[in-house]
Image (cartoon, rainbow, N blue to C red):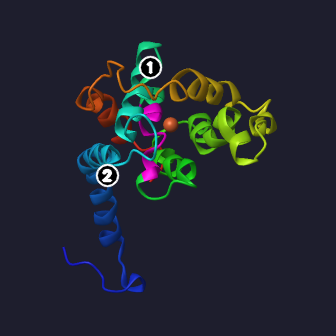
Amino acid sequence: MDSFARMEEGTADQWKAIGDAHRAHYRTTAPMRIMAHLRDLGDLTLGFACDQLHHSLMTATLARRAGASDEEVVGALCHDIGKTMSVPNHGAISAEILKPYVSDDLYHAIRHHQDFQGAYYYDFFDRPTDLRDAHKGKSWYSLACRLCDEWDAPGFDSEFDIDSLESFEPEVVRVFSKPRMM
Ligand SMILES: [Fe+2]
């Protein structure tokens, strides 16, 4: 079917075809694009003891071995995926990539994870280390603490026996092929 050159010319059938194409994209290419994007984290070390792919895999491995849900494991795996685009606001970028596919609580935990991680290092940059306290009482506070303190912060051991990126593909496919919003 021919599609329009200008949105104002769009018909119901053309928009239905676009909706169908989006759904096909979620079922097929979206999860593989996420896997490729995660692989790119292997090019970034950023001064840490391991590259960002290893860090992401260690974070996800710790989550998986702690019995986290598929969605939480994928959140742990992708919490820093935005670093390939921009480090200062990577939490927001990562959260927005995940937003159509995960709970609001997981979205907010990832969106604000730097506020929680600041407890470990912001004093070295003359910034307050208690930024997480502003989020106390929110429904996602305990999830953010778990993500940051139990999976992310300990996740920089280059010797750790991580699970492979490919081992997470089934969870990535399950989460990224079922958007909650279109
Ligand atoms: Fe991280």
Spot the residue most to the top: 66
Pinpoint residue 177: horizontal percent, then vertical percent. Answer: 33, 41
Examine the residues drawn in magenta and state their main secondary structure. helix
> Between disc 1 and disc 2, whose residue precedes?
2
Residue at point 33%, 29% (across, down) = 171
Q: Residues within 10 Å of mark 2 (few under 14, many from 20)?
A: some
Pinpoint residue 11: horizontal percent, then vertical percent. Answer: 35, 77
User: Would residue 70 be found to the left or right of residue 13 on screen?
Assistant: right
**Vertical order, 27 against 141 (above or below):** below
Pinpoint residue 141: horizontal percent, then vertical percent. Answer: 70, 29
Residue at point 68%, 24% (across, down) = 142
Q: Residues within 10 Å of mark 1 (few under 14, many from 20)?
A: many
Residue at point 26%, 27% (across, down) = 164
Q: How many marks?
A: 2
Q: Is residue 78 magenta?
A: yes
Residue at point 36%, 79% (across, down) = 10
Q: Give the amino acid type for the residue marked by disc 1 in the picture.
A: Leu
User: Which portion, as a residue range, is magenta?
Assistant: 74-83
Q: Give the amino acid type for the residue marked by disc 2 in the picture.
A: Arg
Question: Does dot 2 land on a helix, a strand or a loop?
Answer: helix
Q: Which residue is mark 2?
A: 23
Pinpoint residue 74: horizontal percent, then vertical percent. Answer: 41, 32
User: Would residue 14 be found to the left or right of residue 126 on screen?
Assistant: left
Question: Does dot 1 land on a helix, a strand or a loop?
Answer: helix
Q: Nearer the viewer, mark 1 or mark 2?
A: 1
User: Would residue 133 be found to the left or right of residue 7 on screen?
Assistant: right
Q: For disc 2, does the CB lie below 8 Å from ligand 1?
A: no
Q: Quadrant of the C terminus?
A: bottom left
Q: Quadrant of the N terminus?
A: bottom left
Q: Which residue is mark 1?
A: 62
